[in-house]
Image: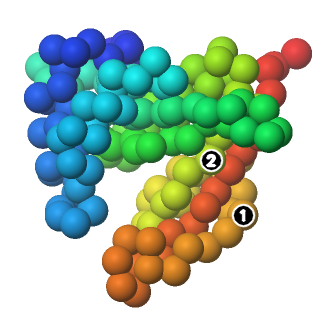
Amino acid sequence: MRYRPYRPSDFEALYAIEMICFEPPLRFPRKYMQRLTQSDQGVTWIAENQTEMAGFAIVEWSRQLRGLVAYLATIEVQPGERQQGVGSELLRLVEQSALDAEAGLLWLHVDAENEVALRLYRRHGYAEVGRVVDYYGAGRAALAVWKPLQREP
């Protein structure tokens, strides 16, 4: 697996993964995804195997009262590439990018019923800090999870 920063020519393959991973109304609109990938207040990482894009992750950051805070907008992996460490490596790259931007915290929303994703985040040191009822539609809650970011000594 190869990991690299996003290029504008990646957008169609990236959005094809979005269409596989999420059904409406949970799917991000194309224009929103384009805005995320083009923002200078974040970064998009691409995972690719020998023949195609295997996944991606998008993180953005903003200045808050407590300093720079990063938000993981999405992390998505093709179904055939899951459970092989792709998500973990994308998450590590996103964390490093947020640290490089001098963010002190990375947070995200995750479907409260997505046990695979929850295990990934817990394994990487994320803690649950809240619950948002009906975040993903009626009856589908999200958990807010976060991780303080610190440089290794």
Residue 67, relative to residue 152: is it above or below? below
Determine whether the residue tagged by mark 2 lies in a helix, strand or loop: strand
Locate residue 94, reporting x and y percent: 53, 28
Q: In the rendered view, does 62 fall on the left or right side of 112?
A: right
Question: Residue at left 44%, top 79%?
Answer: 134
Looking at the figure, which quarter contains the C terminus?
Answer: top right
Question: Residue at left 69%, top 63%?
Answer: 128
Circles 1 and 2: CB distance less than 8 Å?
yes
Query: Can residue 107 be seen in this snapshot?
Result: yes
* Residue named by callout 1: 129
Give the CA separation, mark 1 to mark 2.
Answer: 9 Å
The part of the image, by quadrant, that contains residue 37 is: top left
The part of the image, by quadrant, that contains residue 84 is: top left
**Colour pattern:** rainbow
Locate residue 114, reporting x and y percent: 43, 67
Residue 125, relative to residue 114: is it above or below? above
User: The disc labelled 2 sits on which kind of residue?
Assistant: Trp
Locate residue 77, reporting x and y percent: 30, 41
Query: Which is nearer the N-term, disc 1 or disc 2?
Result: 2
Looking at the figure, which quarter contains the N terminus?
Answer: top left
Question: Residue at left 49%, top 33%?
Answer: 59
Determine whether the residue tagged by mark 1 lies in a helix, strand or loop: strand
* Residue named by callout 2: 107
**Which residue in the rendered view is the most extreme toward the bottom?**
139
User: The disc labelled 1 sits on which kind of residue?
Assistant: Val
Residue 94, relative to residue 24: is it above or below? above
Locate residue 51, reporting x and y percent: 12, 20
Q: Residues within 10 Å of mark 1 (few under 14, many from 20)?
A: few
Q: In the rendered view, does 106 fall on the left or right side of 71?
A: right
Pick the front one: 99 or 79:
99
